[in-house]
Image (cartoon, rainbow, N blue to C red):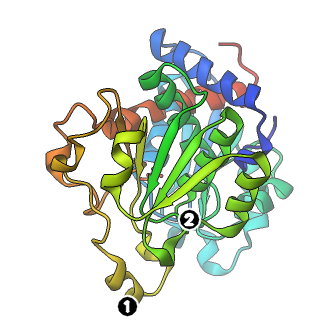
């Protein structure tokens, strides 16, 4: 596959291949796979994990990175179009990792790029490389991807990681619980997709009621930057996970969060055996190494 834009572009077998490759690279690190490759990281929106784990992935595989994390320091500020920016950067590099606040920006970029575009997040739409590291982490903790019961909690409307992961897991027969403010419910188009695939989902009112039934609790931050501040103030702090709420969790239930967290997981959860979000973030390097190697046709 040339560009990595959206999870619905992937087959189940392709997702499994990335997960397998990430596992191989975690078990047996390689320092040479991207030798002589130059990757651009173009971030039009803030990031800690996605940008730095892609850059770590490239450099630990022997490649080099150029890019920017502040579009205001580029000629975008002078009015250059995304199409022209991408045309130019793709003439310098072997692949472009791009994050952009506009939904569909990565797809547009792919139409003007001579090299693979990897979507590092486009608005509230998709975050496919996050889904790949989430799938890798699910398999690492649960030993399988099939038939998992997953609760998505928090901002299900604007949370692009939720959208991508729900679509991916629907290829593996998952069962979902959705918990969050009514104003931030899962988008209709995604519920319709799940209905079409015969995937079971239950909308629940509280975190406590779903905890005994799940393999994975996928917590998310309310995406404050994507809607009105007055609305945010009403919603903030409504769905918070505390350690005392985990009493009835299955022994191997794991808590994931794409991070950053704000206040939706209290720090006392970090030391419970259920917390796995920091390991999940670390797995971003292996999943992104796998993705880049496969996109650039390197044999792992
Ligand atoms: N999970 C994630 O996308 O984190 P960043 O916004 O820090 O890249």
| Residue at numbered disc 2 | 44
* Horizontal and vertical percent position of residue 24: 55, 13
Q: In the rendering, which numbered label is found on residue 95?
A: none
- Crowding at dot 1, Cα within 10 Å, few <14 / some 14-19 / many 20+, comes out as few
User: Is 5 above or below relative to 54?
Assistant: below
Horizontal arrangement in the rendering, residue 36 relative to residue 297 (left or right): left
- In the rendered image, which quarter is residue 168 located in? top right
User: Is 55 above or below relative to 22?
Assistant: below
| Secondary structure type for disc 2 | loop
* Horizontal and vertical percent position of residue 171: 71, 37
* Horizontal and vertical percent position of residue 274: 28, 35
Question: Of 175 and 113, which appears nearest the observer?
Answer: 175
| Secondary structure type for disc 1 | helix
Q: How many marks?
A: 2
| Residue at numbered disc 1 | 230
- Dot in front, 2 or 1: 1
* Residue 91 appears in the rendering: no
- In the rendered image, which quarter is residue 14 located in? top right
């Amino acid at each position: 596959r040339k560009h990595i834009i959206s999870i619905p572009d992937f087959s189940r077998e392709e997702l499994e291949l990335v997960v397998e490759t990430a596992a191989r690279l975690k078990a047996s690190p390689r320092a040479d796979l991207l030798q002589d490759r130059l990757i651009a990281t173009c971030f039009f929106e803030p990031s800690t994990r996605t940008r730095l784990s892609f850059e770590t992935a490239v450099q630990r595989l022997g490649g080099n990175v150029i890019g920017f994390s502040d579009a205001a320091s580029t000629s975008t500020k002078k009015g250059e179009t995304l199409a022209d920016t991408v045309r130019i950067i793709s003439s310098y590099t072997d692949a472009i990792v791009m994050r952009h606040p506009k939904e569909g920006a990565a797809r547009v970029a792919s139409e003007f790029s001579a090299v693979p575009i990897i979507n590092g997040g486009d608005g509230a739409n998709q975050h496919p490389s996050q889904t790949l590291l989430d799938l890798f982490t699910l398999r690492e903790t649960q030993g399988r991807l099939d038939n998992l019961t997953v609760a998505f909690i928090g901002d299900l409307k604007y949370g692009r990681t939720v959208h991508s992961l729900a679509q991916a897991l629907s290829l593996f027969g998952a069962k979902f619980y959705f918990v969050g403010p009514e104003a931030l419910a899962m988008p209709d188009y995604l519920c319709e997709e799940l209905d079409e695939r015969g995937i079971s989902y239950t909308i629940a009112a509280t975190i406590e009621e779903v905890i005994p039934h799940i393999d994975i609790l996928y917590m998310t931050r309310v995406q404050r930057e994507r809607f009105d501040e007055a609305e945010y103030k009403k919603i903030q702090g409504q769905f918070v996970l505390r350690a005392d709420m985990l009493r009835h969790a299955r022994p191997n239930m794991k808590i994931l969060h794409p991070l950053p967290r704000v206040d939706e997981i209290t720090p006392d959860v970090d030391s419970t055996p259920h917390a796995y979000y920091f390991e999940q973030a670390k797995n971003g390097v292996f999943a992104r190494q796998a993705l880049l190697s496969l996109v650039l046709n390197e044999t792992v």
